[in-house]
Amino acid sequence: MGHAETIKGKIESLVTSQFSGRIDDETARWLTSLGDKAYAKLVRVGLAPPRETQAPGLKSSVDAVTLGRFLDEYTRSRVDVKPGTRTTYGRTCHYLLGYFDGDRRLSEISEGDADAWRLHLLGRGLSVNTVNRACGMARQFFRAAVRRKLIVANPFDGLQSSVKGNRAREFFVTEADIAKVLVACPNVEWRLIVALARYGGLRTPSETLLLRWSHIDWEAGKMLVHSPKTEAHPGGESRLVPLFPELRPLLLEAFTAAEPGDGFVIAKHRKRGANLRTHLLRIMAKAGVKPWPKLFQNMRSTRQTELCERWPEYIVCGWLGNSRRVAREHYLQIRDADFLRASEPEKPAQNPAQNPAQQPCAANCDELQPQGQNRTGAINLQEFAIDGTSSQGIPMGGAGFEPATFCV
């Protein structure tokens, strides 16, 4: 490949990163190697963040390194992170500099200071999860300082940073409410955005906006979903999701309405910076539906809860792209209907001999049907595991199919 072709490929990768929110490692290294003049051209067209003029002595003298200067240099140097992560960087820096003096030397911040900072954030009324995220990010910052030999130990290492599921913000999005929302949607693309979240379980906007028509396998009844959130984990860059019966008609409608040459499934609502949440709130107001706490995440968690009633948990986690631990902590819900159903007396089991039609048909049936579905409406698991292949298209070893263990 010639030099011009190499540059063209990198530019295309930078353009793609505007939608995916992440620059791949190879492109990030190429970006770092550019001269100031070439780099400035990319900055002018919005394809790269401005370069920092490094403060003199930052890496040469430990005593000269202050908190403010280090945070500025570190966050600017991370050209490989997604915009959302960069926003989190900025928020954590704000918390740190709002408590510590920016001229405070890194080496002067102790473990006791880190404990006091955490209590300060909690005292401001921030939620435990918000504080834990900030502590995890601060620990990452100071770990980098240790690796650069600016400090000998990380004072934030002992702080709690795990994020727990917030049961108070759980909400089961009923099919009745979604039906009203779909009717109120202004066009087929918006109906599909809602359906992909509620019935496909896709993360929105990241996974929804990356879905292409070439990723849809109509005959096999599945689609390939690329996931920027989990791509750093082995096997987490993509997954196969069934074309669920609730989803297929809307996909066909959108495919029929698509303009020639449209590569992306969502083509008209992918403008950078577009706020899908704000638009969805307007649609819900028009539909007369009260907004639930987490608009897109609640739809995704509702779908996972539904699917786990009919399919083994490891299969559902493979379809939705999360681990069983994360699913149980953040997605699966216990509904009021579950308590009512559990409190009802069990009906006496019928003697199979009284109804031969309901006896097991191991000799005649070639697959098991999930509860609540007939044979024609069920999705055939064999479509996702044929001739010793997994749902990811990877040959299976002698141990068989193992569920994904990456986290989201």
Image (tube, grey):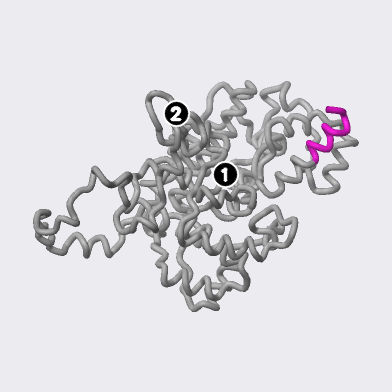
Determine the residue positioned at 46% across, 56% down: 244
Position of residue 264 relative to residue 191, above or below, is: above
- Which residue matches tag 1? 227
Q: Is residue 174 above or below residue 331?
A: below
Sequence order check, earlier mark of 1 and 2: 1
Q: Is residue 198 magenta?
A: no
- The image shows residue 33 at horizontal and vertical percentages of 80, 28
Label 1 crowd (10 A; few <14 / some 14-19 / many >=20):
many
Q: Secondary structure at mark 1?
A: loop
Please state if 258 lies on the left or on the right of 51 as rendered.
left
Residue 9 in the magenta stretch? The answer is yes
SS for dot 2: loop
The location of residue 82, given as percent across then percent down, is 64, 43
- For the N terminus, give its image quadrant: top right
Mark 1–mark 2 distance (CA, rounded to whole Å) = 22 Å
Residue 13 visible from this viewpoint: yes
* Span highlighted in magenta in the image: 1-11
What residue lies at 67% left-to-right and 54% top-to-bottom? 264
Left or right of 336, for residue 34 = right
What secondary structure is the magenta-colored segment mainly?
helix
Which residue does the numbered mark 2 point to in the structure image?
A: 396
